[in-house]
Image (cartoon, rainbow, N blue to C red):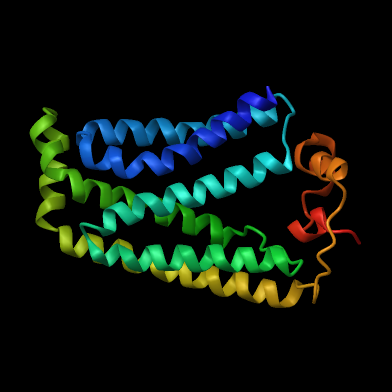
Amino acid sequence: MKIVVNTLTLLRLVATFFLPVLWRFCSSISVLGIVAIILLTDFFDGFLSRRFHVQSLFGSLADAISDKLFGIAIVLMIALNYPIFYFIVGMEILIALINVVAAFLGAKTQSSIIGKSKMWILGLATLCGIIAVFKTDMINSLNVEWIISLLEFFTLNEDIILIAVVGVTVGAEIIVAIDYAINLYKNKKGRIKFDFKDSKTIKKVLFDTEYYLNNRNLSLSEHFMRS
């Protein structure tokens, strides 16, 4: 089951690199359906890993990387049509860089209520961006009156809606970046000696469930470097 769970996570990572092709050549409904299916893998890999007790550090890292890259890729595709979304792309990259630096300095940027709230706000902004890109196709292909009415309202107020959601999202990202940076400054371990553990130990660190559950609060450097 651990292989199945990790495969679901890696499929999301692979799908990220095919997203520009799907975005360019598939219909709006197809793109939305594919994105929805990919997002479902995010739910199921987490659910199955907990249900069958197969959590691992590898799975956690792959999940985090897949989520971040997939999210950035979608927003980047939107930004090609609506450049205001480049602000979101830039902030997401900054937050990712802070996490990478934290990993090398022995700190861990804990997910907080601020970070979780930012994800919901980012999700809303992404949804609005997708609707903006595909609104014409959606209006022409959907025959549900109330959905068409909503899309027409969105079209009439598109500029205001997009400026509002991007502004709120970037504001939330700035707060998260500052929170992570402060946490990094307070919890960094100083200069890290890059002396890796042996391959057998690293394999256990990456894939052993009991190890992960007992040591999930360690930073990446603490997982992989000798003390």
**Between residues 26 and 142, which one lies in front from this camera angle?**
26
Residue 69 x %, y %: 47, 51
On the image, which quarter does residue 136 sit in?
A: top left
Query: Residue at coordinates 50% horizontally, 41% vertically from top-left?
Result: 13
**Residue at 78 percent of width and 54 percent of height:** 217
> In the figure, residue 60 lies in which quadrant?
top right
**Up-down relation of residue 151 to residue 162 (above or below):** above
x 24%, y 61%: residue? 162
In this picture, is 204 found above or below 37?
below
| Left or right for 221, reference 125 | right
Check the picture and name the quadrant holding the N terminus. Answer: top right
Left or right position of 158 against 7: left
Write the residue at 28% across / 35% down: 31
Q: Position of residue 70 (x, y in %)?
A: 44, 47
- Looking at the rendered structure, the number of numbered marks drawn on it comes to 0
Report x, y in % for residue 160: 19, 64
Figure quadrant of residue 54: top right
- Which quarter of the image is occupied by the C terminus? bottom right
Closest to the observer: 132 or 12? Answer: 12
The reply, left or right, for residue 25 in relation to residue 66 is: left
- The answer to whether residue 169 shows anywhere in this view is no
> Is residue 56 shown to the viewer in this render?
yes
